[in-house]
Image (cartoon, rainbow, N blue to C red):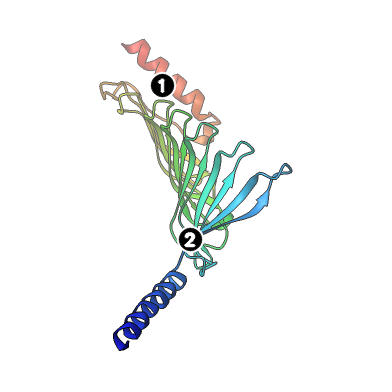
Amino acid sequence: MLTKVCRELYWCFILQFSAFLLFSCNHSEKKIVARFADGRPQVVYEFPDSNDTLTYTLKILGPSGNLKQMAFVSHGMFVNKAVTYMDNGVPYRIDSLLAPCKSLKSCDEIRFIYNENGTPSQIYTVMNGVCEGNIKQYSQNGTLIKSYNLIHDSVKNGEYLEFFNSGKIAFRAEYKNDTMVGIGYVFKENGDSSKGRMIFRRRFGWTTAILKSAIILMIKSMQ
């Protein structure tokens, strides 16, 4: 009799302990916070731990259910990265966050823009909502074609480079406060620039495009 009671108490304990583990363990949860007019989900929060409502994955969906944007929130702050997708599912833009931030509109980040075929189109740094530092631009096939530096979103400052499809430098100049200074060089693809060297300054009233065209014509005439 005593053995039977002990056995029953043992299994009772096992069942209670199992129930405790089941309900005390964290579990994920999905919450729809916005819908389209037809009721389909538009904005979804995915919580890895339903008890922590400040840490989740934010997903913005299109009308057909395709993923348009995804971002990660930890302790109420955007972290890691935010990805914006094209309709074909290829990332159009990746914001690699440099620090946690409250709003994606004000994050300091390195921004990657992609072509529809998945190759890079632009890479640049955003600080306090504006472009700061080096800007890289790529062709449709992902070849680097331009590299230059910006301050305050639009002012060229520092070295300016353009490249051939081979990756070799095609044009090099120096900017200071959005004004080209010193000597600009137009290169042949073999690297020779001796026939294309010319001083040009803004005080002559010449645009960069006109000067580059003049240098290229000069090179061709001397070949």
Secondary structure under tag 2 reads loop
Across and down, in percent, residue 172 comes to 37, 33
Across and down, in percent, residue 135 comes to 44, 42
Q: Residue furthest front?
A: 1
Question: Which label belongs to residue 35?
Answer: none
* Callout 1 amino acid: Ile
Question: Which residue is more in the foreground, 48 or 187?
Answer: 48
Residue at coordinates 29% horizontally, 21% vertically from top-left? 189
Q: In this view, does 223 lie to the left or right of 30?
A: left
Visible residue check, residue 142: yes
Lower position in the chain sequence, tag 2 or tag 1? 2
Residue at coordinates 63% horizontally, 47% vertically from top-left? 41
Residue at coordinates 56% horizontally, 54% vertically from top-left? 129
The residue at which mark 2 appears reads as 28
Question: Which residue is more in the foreground, 158 or 77?
Answer: 77
Secondary structure under tag 1 reads helix
* Callout 2 amino acid: Ser
Q: In this view, does 184 lie to the left or right of 107?
A: left
Crowding at label 1, few (<14), some or many (≥20) Cα neighbours within 10 Å? many
Give the vertical position of 182 relative to 28 (above or below): above
Question: Which label belongs to residue 215?
Answer: 1
